Structures are given as C-alpha cells and as structure tokens.
Amino acid sequence: MTCIVQKFGGTSLATLDLIKKAALRVKGEVEAGHTVVVVVSAMAGTTNTLVEYVSDLSTTYDRAEYDVVVSSGEQVTAGLLALSLQNLGIPARSWQGWQIPIYTSSHHAQAKIDHIDTDLLLHDLNKGTVAVVAGFQGLSRNGRITTLGRGGSDTTAVALAAALKAERCDIFTDVEGIYTADPNYITTAGKLDHIAYQEMLELAAQGAKVLQRDSVELAMHNRVRLRVLSSLRDTPGTLVTSENELRATRKHISGIAHSLSHVKLTLCALPSTLPLEEIRSLLNSQNIPLDMGHQKLFPCGTLLDFSFTVPATEERRAVEMLQTAKNKFNFRDLLRNSDVAKVSVIGSGLQTEYSPSHKLFQTLREKGIEVQAVAASDIKLSVLIAAHEAGRAISTLHTVYQLDAEEN
C-alpha cells in the first residue's frame, strides 16, 4: 500500500463540524487502500491566544516554556480528530512530536527538524491504524518540547512524508491552491495549477501564507510532491513539484507576494567604518532575521544611516538588543517605522529578461510610489514601500505582469 500524508490547517479544523469533515476525507483515502498519516494544526485562533498569554506575562520570556504553552493547541486537535475517525470505524490514534519522536535543534520557537525516528510509527501504521500527528512540535536532544515556528505543521507534514517515502503530501487549507497573489487582497488573483519548488520557496519566503518556507525547502531537497487543496471543496488544487514535471507553457512571472508584518528600523549616524555585518550577527544570535538592508552615506563620508526590517513580532526584542549595544555601535538614534510593506515579484523570467524588473520600477514611479529599499535574487525582486500604498501597488503590478484571472 502507498503512504499518503495529509495535513489540515487551523481554519480547516476550526470547529467540531470541520473536524468531522476532515475525518471523512481521511476515511476516503483509507478506503482507497492507502496508509494514511494525518498532521494537524491547532484550531484556528488557538495559537494566537496562547501566544498572547505568554506575551502578557513577560516580554523577556523563557522560550522553552513558550514552546510548552503554544504547542498544546495541536495536542487537542490531534485527539479530537482521532476520536472522530474512531467514530467512523477507522482505527486511529494521536501522536505528539515527542512520542514519535521528531528530534529537532534546541532553538526554541524556531527549531529545525534533525531526524525522525519512524520505528514506532511504522509499527502502528502496519497494523492499519491511522496516525494523527500533532504538527508544529518536536523534541530537543535534551528532552524539551520545541516548536517549528508559525506554520510549522506544514514542515512536520513534509518531513514525515520524506521520512516515510510517501507518495505525496496533501496540504488542506481554506483556499483552493496557490494563487498569483493573495486572493483575500487581490480579487483578480488566479489559481496556479502547477508551480516549481524554487518559485514556491520565494513566494513563501516573501509573505505568501499558504505554505511555511521551511516546508517548501524540505520538500524541494527531498523531492516530496506537494498538493495544496481546499478542505471545503473538491477542486484539483496546485501541484508543487520539480521544474521538469511542469507543463511546457509557463508564465515568466508566477506571482506577487507581499508582507505587512515587518517594521523598519533605522540606526542614525553610524560610523561608516563599522562593519554592518556586526549588526546582522547580533540580531541573528537571537534568531531575529534582518531583511531589506539599505544604507545612506552622509555627504561628509564618515557617517551613514542604516535601515533594515525585522518581523513585527520581534520588534521589541530587536530594539532592546540594539539599545543595549548603542555604545558598541556608536549610533546617534534609533527610529522605528511600522508603515512599511514588502512587495515581491516572483518568477523565472527575472533570470533572463530585462523587461520584468524594468516594469516594476517604471510602474511604481508612474504611480508616485516611493521605493525605500530593494532586494533581489535570480527569481525574486522585492521592494519596500509605504504600507498604505501596498494595495495600489500590488493591484497595478498584478495587471502589468498579466496575472489577472480571465473572467468566466
């Protein structure tokens, strides 16, 4: 029998009725003769509530205890789905990350999966029992519960699919697949039938919320075939796979991603002789990513302003760390700006053609939208703009790159 991994997100498990519907989908795969592993997220809103509990107690909380708290939501959902399957006559049991076990690094709240011991899981699967696994959580080598970052249940599902050599990994969510832009933001966004791992990786990294970035990277390295599907409708969804599996006719630009969840920090009047990599290293030491870096040299040549973005969730920690290091870096002031958005154009056409990148800057200039910073890779071009301009920018660029869905 072939093994199938199914992952259900929080919006697909938000109520008992939805959990029952998810159980019916699992039952369908079992009746089709598949061995099934199900990975679940916490019910919608649960993790946010748990995070708020921790944040309300302390701004400098112990991250190991944070993981204990926020990982509990998945435990509830795993048990409820296992019960729902049993009610349908399907043998099922729940598994926590530490029970399998899924071994991870000790970087609490942002752990990486090191290794999965599948012996116990396979023993149960070989008896015909459906495994319902609590996503998002693992076990450090020193025996502590860890979590894989927001959206980490996707990574749990892909890692299990790779370890079990599953035929595919189906990600069920509240949208029908991967779109050319966020359909909740751009009504003309069209669904993609196929997308290459590398392009999906960039979309996820630049703000597309359908798949966690680490899960796509893991799928790409292990050649796990992903399907992103609606948990509410029977539609084909989007296949995420290697470049050579895609259809010959593809658009040069696959989509536009955006993020409104970053804060721009500016260190004013830094010595121009300071290696800016020291600032990045300081933040990275506490797993705070620095993005969209940009420097502006003073006319005197001895001072500069250094601007960059950090996740809004990490703003307070980042500011505290930088203020503590003020004498070391010798900057005059630290400015914050939450009115920023990162907009990214993704596609293989950026590798070979001048016009896609030219269109981006020309379009924004014609619309009077100021570009505050630029970052680029082979298949990604990102700009930082004012958040209140994001809707206008994305909508216009979506049309300019001919991504608008055709009306039926």
Image: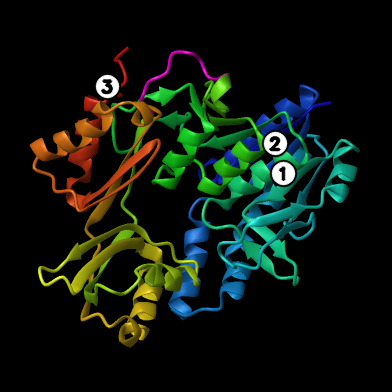
Residue 253 x, y percent position in the rendering = 35, 27
For the residues labelled 2 and 3, say whether their Cβ atoms are less than 8 Å apart: no
Q: Nearer the viewer, mark 1 or mark 3?
A: 3
Q: Which residue matches tag 2?
A: 5
Q: Is residue 208 above or below residue 105?
A: above
Q: Amino acid at mark 1?
A: Leu
Q: Which residue matches tag 1?
A: 160
- The magenta-colored residue range is 245-254
Q: Nearer the viewer, mark 1 or mark 2?
A: 1
What separation in Å lies between label 1 and label 3 (alpha carbons)? 38 Å
In the picture, the quarter occupied by the C terminus is top left
For this rendering, which residue is in front, 299 or 40?
299
For the residues labelled 1 and 3, say whether their Cβ atoms are less than 8 Å apart: no
Q: Amino acid at mark 3?
A: Gln
Q: Is residue 34 above or below residue 370?
A: above
- Answer with left or right where residue 370 lies relative to residue 140: left
Q: Main secondary structure of the magenta part?
A: loop
State the residue at coordinates (32%, 61%): 309
Q: Secondary structure at mark 2?
A: strand
Q: Secondary structure at mark 3?
A: loop
For this rendering, which residue is in front, 291 or 315?
291
